[in-house]
Amino acid sequence: MNETTRQKSDLAYRRLVLKLSGDALADPSGCGVDATRAAEIAGRVAAVHALGAEIVIVIGGGNLWRGHVGVDQGMNQAQADSMGMLATVINGLALQDALERCGIVTRVQTAVHMNTLAEPYIRLRAVRHLEKGRIVISAGGTGNPYFTTDTAAALRAAELGADVFIKATKVDGVFSADPEIHPEAERFSHLSYREVLAGKFLVMDMTAVTLCEENRMPILVLDFWREDALVDALLGVSQANGGTLIDGATA
């Protein structure tokens, strides 16, 4: 058994979809693309890639444009959402550059066709890239307005046969209240899809949760910036120390 095969056999999840917000790439002001942050993200992803995991990244575009802001100002929602999809492509290209600098072959595939910049999203091609050890960045959302990038990530997780959907945030799991406002808030180590949907927890778009439930796709919510959080998740370290697992099991 070679080293890569051994490492893959040790993983709790072999193929994952990692959902990052556009804010993860933002500079300290919360806007734009910060090359230093992109490099930090790439380093954390590279550590998981080195374990032999197959990785799909879906990234938002909120650091560049938020569709609801345009809608609030009277813009047509389809137009505003289309602008948001383009913002995710910009972020995808920035993250690709950072990952390639780490020596990882990366492909950006976009649901909005722009062949001079990125590949069109084709499911079987994406699978082949993963099998070859490449990281796939799925940009452009679903290619349709009215859907969030959370839903796009849930869709990609289902159709690419991922073992887990990792929702990377800046808080370590799902809490009973906003922990930044209420430090006493309780963190849940485990929730069922039904509990999330009924409790209206602000985890992600409810369409995304429903799609994961229908496809029995486990969701792991974790603090991407906690040291080794992503590696621990892939090695199956218990949620006792952080993170929340959402699946079909009930407590």
Image: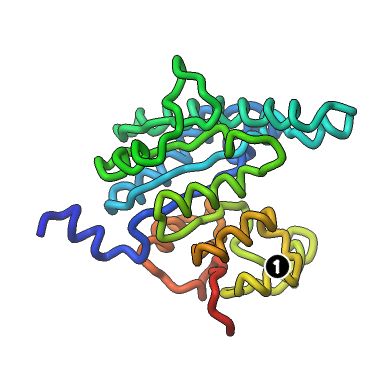
As shown in the figure, which amino acid type bears the numbered disc 1? Leu
In the image, 79: left or right of 51?
A: right
Query: On the rendered image, what quadrant is the N terminus found in?
Result: bottom left
Q: Residue under circle 1?
A: 197
Residue 199: horizontal and vertical position, in percent?
75, 71
Residue located at (51% from left, 56% from top): 166
Assign a secondary structure to mark 1: helix
Tell me if residue 5 comes above or below residue 241 in the rendering.
above
Quadrant of residue 186 in the image? bottom right
Q: Residues within 10 Å of mark 1 (few under 14, many from 20)?
A: some
Residue 246: horizontal and vertical position, in percent?
56, 69
- The front one of 44 and 78 is 78
Quadrant of residue 84 in the image? top right
Residue located at (33% from left, 58% from top): 14
Query: On the rendered image, what quadrant is the C terminus found in?
Result: bottom right
Residue 179: horizontal and vertical position, in percent?
72, 63
Residue located at (28% from left, 53% from top): 51
